[in-house]
Every structure is written in C-alpha cells, then in structure tokens.
Image: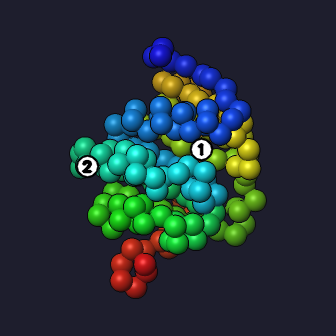
Amino acid sequence: MPDSLEELFDTRAAFQRAVDTVLPLAKKEICVFDADLRNLEFDTRVRADMISAFLAGGRDRSVRMVLHELDHVTRYSPRLVGLLKRYSHCFSIRQTPESLRNLADAFVLADGVSGVIRFHADHFRGKLLLEQAVAVHDWQQRFEGLWVEAIPGFSVTQLGL
C-alpha cells in the first residue's frame, strides 16, 4: 500500500477494511465521531484488542469519541466499557447536544493525518485517507469543535455504569 492514499469505498466490507487499515496507524490519538458506534464494531474482540494495544502503547496516547447516542455502548459493548474503565485517564466518550444530533456524517481519525470518512452515517459510502494531513485537517478541526460542544457525561464509575 502506498504511503499516501485517498481511496473511495461504497460497501460495508470496504468500510470495515478501511477502519482496520487506519486504527493500527495511530501512534498518538484516535478521534471518532459517530451516531452510536454500532457500525464501527469496536466491541468485537479484534477491534477492542486494537484499541487496547494502542492505549497500552504509551502514556501520551488517547482515544476520544463523540457520539449522538450512548445506549449502544452502555448496553451492547462490554469490551469497550471495560477499556473505558481500565483507561479512563486517556479514553473518553462524550455525547453531542440535542442541537447537533442532526449531523449525519461519521469518521475515524488517526493522528490527524489518516482517516475513514463516511459521508452519511446511514450509508457505507465514503473515503479512506492515508497520510493525507491536508485533507484530514478540516475533519480534525470539525472533531475538535464537536468535542468542545459535546456533553461530558459518560461515566464508568459506580454511579455511572
């Protein structure tokens, strides 16, 4: 695979391959914006192990997620919740405020230079960006804006989960 690439996809399988390509590239930070993580399948053993290995790789690593709905994570993602408990110092999930829940795109970014972008969360049409800092920059800025607006409310303490 070339060092720098932009590739379109339009199937679930190609989307899943793109996610599996981008996640291992992260060395510092993974940023995710999604409706509920359902289609990202982060609670599968393989993906949960990827995230765990990433977070265990250094103190300066982080995973930040902004989701519209938290229900899928709390009800159907025990591996992910376990990672949230274990790595609560560097793994955070926030929820979009009601006013932003109409946003329909979704993306996974690695270190602000690679990413998987879905143009609409209801479809598997999008693009894979590898080592495309300029193309990923606007998506990273979008994520940072969403992060600031999002509600910190996902707690894995006894009072939360």
Number of marks in picture: 2
Instruction: Say if residue 118 shows up in the picture.
Output: yes
Toward the viewer: 59 or 38? 38
Q: Which corner quadrant of the image does residue 30 belong to?
A: top left
Please report the residue visible at 39 percent of the width from the left and 35 percent of the height from the top.
24
Q: Position of residue 45 (x, y in %)?
A: 40, 51
Instruction: Say if residue 141 shows up in the picture.
Output: no
Please report the residue visible at 48 percent of the width from the left and 36 percent of the height from the top.
20
Q: Which mark is residue 107?
A: 1
The amino acid marked with disc number 1 is Phe
Please report the residue visible at 54 percent of the width from the left and 43 percent of the height from the top.
108
Query: Which residue was labeled with disc 2?
Result: 56
Q: Which corner quadrant of the image does residue 147 belong to?
A: bottom right
Please report the residue visible at 54 percent of the width from the left and 33 percent of the height from the top.
17
Q: Position of residue 109 (x, y in %)?
A: 51, 40
Q: Is residue 97 left or right of residue 40?
A: right
Where the C terminus falls, by quadrant?
A: bottom left
Instruction: Estimate the spatial distance between the alpha carbons at disc 1 and disc 2, rounded to whole Å.
Output: 23 Å
Say whether disc 1 or disc 2 marks the residue closer to the N-terminus: 2
Toward the viewer: 71 or 92? 71
Q: Is residue 40 left or right of residue 123?
A: left
5 up-or-down from 22: above or below: above
Q: Residue furthest bottom?
A: 159
Toward the viewer: 96 or 128? 128
